[in-house]
Structures are given as C-alpha cells and as structure tokens.
Image (cartoon, rainbow, N blue to C red):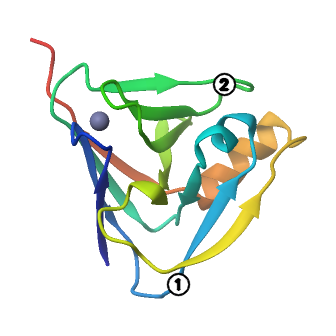
Amino acid sequence: MLIQGGCHCGQLTYELDWPDDRKPVPARACSCTYCTRFGGNWISDPNARLQIRATSPDAMSRYRFGTKTADFLFCSFCGVSIAAISRIGGKDYAVVNVNTFSEPVTLAQSRSDFDGESADDRLARRAQRWIAQVRYRLPSAD
Ligand SMILES: [Zn+2]
C-alpha cells in the first residue's frame, strides 16, 4: 500500500511504501513532552520504505531534545512535523506522523510512553521497529 503525505503548505512531501495492505494500520500516539504539544501520532514498520522530498534546500528543519538521539523533521514554512529520524550505525531510521497523510487510513490506535528508557535501549528498539529504508530527494543549495 502506497501512502502519500506531507506538511500543510506542500514544501515537504513523502511517499511511504507500507509493506502490506493489512488494516487497520498500527499508530502510536507519543506521550513525550514534544509530541504532546502537537499530537504526534506515529507509524513505523521495519519493512516499510520512506522517501522524503523537499521543494527547496531550506524547506526542511530539524529539532532534537532530551537524549538527542532523534531529529524531528518539520517544514520551515508551515511548521508541520512529518517524520522523526534516528541515525543508528550510520543509517537513518524513521517514523511518520499519521496526521500528515494525504488520505485518511484506518488506524489501530495505541499510546506509547518511553520515559525512563535508556538511550541504548531506545536505539535498539528503533533499529528493530522503525522504518529501515529512508531516502531523501532534497534539492541542493547551489
Ligand atoms: Zn509546509
């Protein structure tokens, strides 16, 4: 199943190639202090493939906090966060914000709370569960 989505103004878009047509799709509302503020609700599967596109070099901003092991990707213009990226062993792993899907997808909703998890456990969990194939189509600044 191909899921398309993006930020509000359209400068950041993505294609998420979801590994099967299984529905509902499991989504996790994150209870961290950042996600709580905008209702971050995430989807991931190790066999999914994600391609992220930006219309200009300055369209994509990053934000990190706490253990600083993940970057939230958000649009520099409209401020919407489409994905979070964790770089582990030189490779990017991702989760995608279901609130940014172009078309609604039926979700099996749960909540996650990773407070108190050590940084090592966090990276191990992401390397197992997050989207393992992440590509970028970003225009260069020159
Ligand atoms: Zn935008």
Left or right, 19 with reference to 27 = left
Q: Residue furthest left?
A: 142
Q: Could you say whether the residue bearing mark 2 is in a helix, strand or loop? A: loop
- The quarter holding residue 12 reads top left
Image position, residue 76 (x, y; %): 34, 24
84 relative to 15, above or below: above
Badge number at residue 24: 1
Mark 1 closeness class: few <14, some 14–19, many ≥20 residues within 10 Å:
few
Badge number at residue 68: 2
Tag 1 near tag 2, CB within 8 Å: no
Tell which quarter ligand 1 is in.
Answer: top left
Q: Nearer the viewer, residue 96 or 87?
A: 96
Q: Which mark's residue is nearer the viewer, 1 or 2?
A: 1
Badge number at residue 59: none
**First reached walking from the N terminus: tag 1 or tag 2:** 1
Q: Residue at x 24, y 39 (%)?
A: 9
Q: Nearer the viewer, residue 94 or 72?
A: 72
Image position, residue 88 (x, y; %): 57, 38
Q: Residue at x 48, y 53 (%)?
A: 97
Q: Residue furthest bottom?
A: 22
Q: Amino acid at mark 1?
A: Pro
Give the spatial CA distance, label 1 vs label 2: 31 Å
Question: The N terminus lies in which quarter of the figure?
Answer: bottom left
Q: Residue at x 39, y 24 (%)?
A: 61
Q: Could you say whether the residue bearing mark 1 is in a helix, strand or loop? A: loop
Q: Residue at x 38, y 72 (%)?
A: 104
Q: Amino acid at mark 2?
A: Lys
Tell me if the residue at label 2 has its CB under 8 Å from ligand 1: no
Left or right, 37 with reference to 90 = right
Q: Nearer the viewer, residue 99 or 124?
A: 99
